[in-house]
Image (cartoon, rainbow, N blue to C red):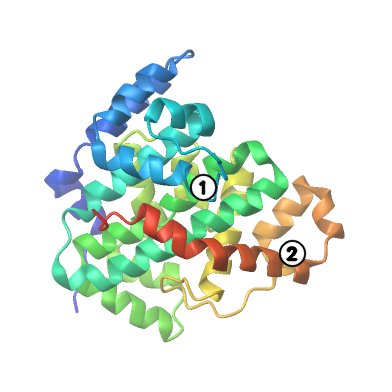
Amino acid sequence: MSAVNLAQLIEDTDWLVSPPTVVEHINTLLKHEQVHWNEIARIVEREPAVAARILRVVNSPLYGLKVPVTSIPQALVYMGTLAVTSITTAVSIFSQLLAESQPEAVPYLERFWWHSTCAAFVARALAEQLERSLADQVFTAALLHDVGKLLMIQLALPQYRELEQQILSGVPEQEAERAIMGMTHEEAGHLLAQRWKLPEPLPSVIRFHSAPQMLQRFQTQAAVTRIADLLCEVWGAGIGEGISKVVLAEEPSWKLLAEKFPELEQIDLAAFTLNLEQRFREAATMLHAMLDTSAE
């Protein structure tokens, strides 16, 4: 099977020229130092499908509210502007990309979405234990970290099938991607993030989630995302990296986090990982149902 030039495919695909309208509007607002929550609410409310998912999230056990939230302005009060805009951005991007799906791509897309939502949950749970203020930001970064693979599935499915076979046969992922697609999935996702002018730390995490040490800024977000990515591969929510075992203490991303958060050196890694896995098992299905773009 002949290789493809994924960068050229992205460049030539009309529906990838511009980001979803709601993402453009939100990014424009966030460039201003002071953004009133009413402006964010008006943008989200114009997208009923996105608004419905925001309400599902805020009313889920993830937030543990006793009184149901029935409006986006209320959701902004409980979740905060960052959480609402982050989830809106992620869901809108996936909605646009998945709208172009072909029937034969559905099994791959389902596996992609399962991995992405699970990684987002695990990353959020890990961030809460390290630096709670990053939890919502990391959730969205993890949700979008493999968007380059989604582009491969959508634009070059036959080659993506060949790519997965090569990885399963032992060829390193990045080597196989460059040979078949002309670029890695990190590079493809970053190309889209730049084209759509997504706000940081999304472009940085998408580009360097496999090697956070290459970043000067947003190392924590990228490292947390990578740990979540690896753990989900091991726990049965993978997307073709061929990883069956992870030793956290030996992972560069974990070492980077341990340098930033010395308390990690003292924890029982087995118990820590077991706790994360338990939370993953309890919440993964719930998150999948809430965020699945095919549910509506």
User: Which residue shows up at 57% across the image and 60% down it?
Assistant: 228
User: What number of labels is visible?
Assistant: 2
Give, as a three-letter code, the residue at label 2: Phe
Q: Residue furthest front?
A: 67
Q: Residues within 10 Å of mark 1 (few under 14, many from 20)?
A: many
Q: Is residue 136 left or right of residue 40?
A: right
Where disc 2 sits, the SS reads: helix
Mark 2 surroundings: few (<14), some (14-19) or many (≥20) residues within 10 A: few
Res 39 label = none
The picture places residue 281, in percent across and down from the top left corner, at 56, 68
- Mark positioned earlier in the residue sequence (1 or 2): 1
Q: Is residue 179 visible?
A: yes
Q: Is residue 107 above or below residue 93?
A: below
| Side of 8 where 172 appears, left or right | right
Q: Which residue is mark 2?
A: 272
* Vertical position of residue 75 compared to residue 235: above or below: above
Residue with the most extreme right position: 266
Rendering quarter of residue 157: bottom left
The x and y percentages for residue 32 are 43, 15
Q: Nearer the viewer, residue 201 or 207?
A: 201
- Percent across and percent down for residue 216 are 61, 39
Give left or right: position of 283 versus 193: right
Do tag 1 and tag 2 residues touch (Cβ < 8 Å)?
A: no
Question: Which of the pair 232/244 is nearer the observer?
Answer: 232
Q: What residue does disc 1 label?
A: 139
Query: How far across and down, in percent of the image, does residue 38 sit?
Result: 39, 17
Residue at image point 41% right, 57% down:
146
Residue at (44, 16) in percent of width and height: 35
Q: Nearer the viewer, residue 242 or 98?
A: 98
Q: Quadrant of the N terminus?
A: bottom left
User: What separation in Å lies between label 1 and label 2 (alpha carbons)?
Assistant: 19 Å
Q: Amino acid at mark 1?
A: Phe
